[in-house]
Image (spheres, coloured by chain):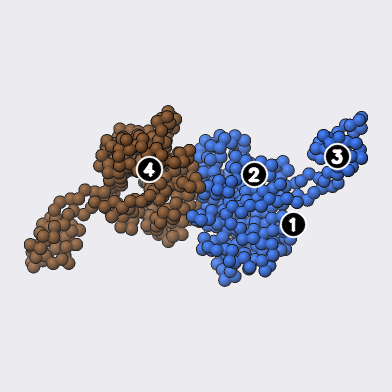
Chain colours: A blue, B brown
Amino acid sequence: MTEVCLPGTGGMVPLPDRWLTCCWIEQQGCAVLIDCGEGTQIALKEADCRLSRLDTLLITHFHADHIAGLPGLLLTLGNSGKTSPLTIIGPEGLNSIVTSLTCIAPALPFPLEILEKDSSHGGEWHINNIKISWLPLNHRIPCFGYSVLYSRKPIFNPQKAAVLGIPKTLYKTLHDGNSVMYNGQLIKPETVLDGQRAPIKICYSTDTLPIEALVEFASGADLLISEGMYGKEEMRRKMTDKMHMLFSDSAKIAKQADVGLLWLTHFSPALTNPDEQLDSARQIFGNTVVAYDGIRANIVK
Amino acid sequence: MTEVCLPGTGGMVPLPDRWLTCCWIEQQGCAVLIDCGEGTQIALKEADCRLSRLDTLLITHFHADHIAGLPGLLLTLGNSGKTSPLTIIGPEGLNSIVTSLTCIAPALPFPLEILEKDSSHGGEWHINNIKISWLPLNHRIPCFGYSVLYSRKPIFNPQKAAVLGIPKTLYKTLHDGNSVMYNGQLIKPETVLDGQRAPIKICYSTDTLPIEALVEFASGADLLISEGMYGKEEMRRKMTDKMHMLFSDSAKIAKQADVGLLWLTHFSPALTNPDEQLDSARQIFGNTVVAYDGIRANIVK
């Protein structure tokens, strides 16, 4: 089971009733956090996300509303007893930004593994059963969209195993892809497996103008989390100037990418009731939700 | 009238129900803020402190819970239309810390006037009718206590003015310390004044071990705002190690300094109900209040 939560859904400025946009993804006690603006550590606490489980931090870009909470987050992580490394991935400039911001968090009890990535093209990084991919977006400064893909175990066929008389205590070993010796016979895992399961894919995109490459990048995602600064079409010009998307832009991408579900996020502070604009997205992509702080989903398939 | 507000009262870590310690002092539309940890800009909003009035920012020291909110605060100030300078005062290292933290707030529409002060001794700075003084405290890194002193107009005696037949329209000019010519006579302000009024003095001290110099520094303050990480004496050893004060330490200083009122602040995140420990301070200094987020006082005398 993969859990996804948006502890915050606001853009630009943290508000008393809306934290800044970020995303928490957790599977088997290991968590990925995307972005950490001012207050994200508090938002995580409110949303019951357990900071001690954080292994990987993905930074979309270096506007303050996406990274200003870094030093506080790192210090609180340290106080939570973390000693294992934290991996931070982000566009070029990441080393310098992390160095600068940690001037007030100089002695952490865990190492930082800083993966600064060229923002002229995408890339990917693997850890355990997770593949993290990034795509350069089109914002005022280098900015990445992220896809987090969890591979899943293949389908185990207990009938095939039963025919071979394999005891149930060996099922897990085989299911994990290992061979077993039983009754003098080598049994390979493929003997009892029925092929691959589709991975779980979560895609995150903010801040950007709509770009064609996002469709391929988000293709088939179970969940696309994408920005909607405003809903109304009359904000188009302003948003184009500021290089952000409207609800309808994200809905178009969700439709073309054939995703399972779209969560809109990163609302303008001026948009006090984003839910009122939901129709502008649903007319294009039915399975759209206007997210709110603390929204949570368990992705099972 | 001088308004004082503590938008936050927590130490170390911002919590869902307690912002980090800071202090807002406002008189005649000009405000001084002491410290800005993560989330202080939100705390200010919740406490109805109008950021656009901020002229002066005093930083006690460079632990994250006292300064991590700086870049967000500056950006939001810029978005609020500020173009006049913001003065920032703090201990040595201030230039470097401000430069580092503003790597994510590179283009502000107002200038920063950065007054980095030698932390081996105290000093003072004057703006309009305000005298800001600082005192080196005894913490793990250089740390200042601050005193904000508002001088007040002398006492105007309307009877003296009436005897001289001065029209009421000239009272304000005289009260402001200017002379007037009336009926061919030069009237000096001292002719109609009855001497000086005591200034309004607000004193702020956190984080520190108790030091003797604080008594003189806070002497006669109308309001002393001082840290109380814990109330119980059993926390003495831990607090001495970490170089913080208990409720009773602040109460002793308040008593010796003969202040009007003591507000305790900067509570440990582990101290969920600081009010329960109030007696440990009141036994020493009766006029003690356990502060809470948003506490506010108008100082009139």
Q: CA distance from mark 4 to mark 2?
A: 38 Å
Per the image, the residue denoted by label 3 is A189
Judging depth in this view, the residue of B178 and B103 nearest the camera is B178
Q: Quadrant of residue A141?
A: bottom right
List x then y, in percent, for residue A76.
53, 40
Residues at badges 2 and 3 in contact (C-beta under 8 Å)? no
Give the letter of the chain under mark 2: A
The structure residue drawn at horizontal position 26% and vertical position 49%, both measured from the top left corner, is: B200
User: Pointer 2: residues within 10 angstroms few (<14), some, or many (20+)?
Assistant: many
Judging depth in this view, the residue of B77 and B16 nearest the camera is B16
The structure residue drawn at horizontal position 92% and vertical position 40%, both measured from the top left corner, is: A163
> What mark, if any, has residue A31 been given in the picture?
2
Mark 4, mark 1: which one is toward the viewer? Answer: 4
Q: CA distance from mark 2 to mark 1?
A: 22 Å
Q: Is residue A161 above or below residue B197?
A: above
Q: Amino acid at mark 3?
A: Pro
Give the structural element (helix, strand or loop) at label 2: strand
The structure residue drawn at horizontal position 66% and vertical position 66%, both measured from the top left corner, is: A282
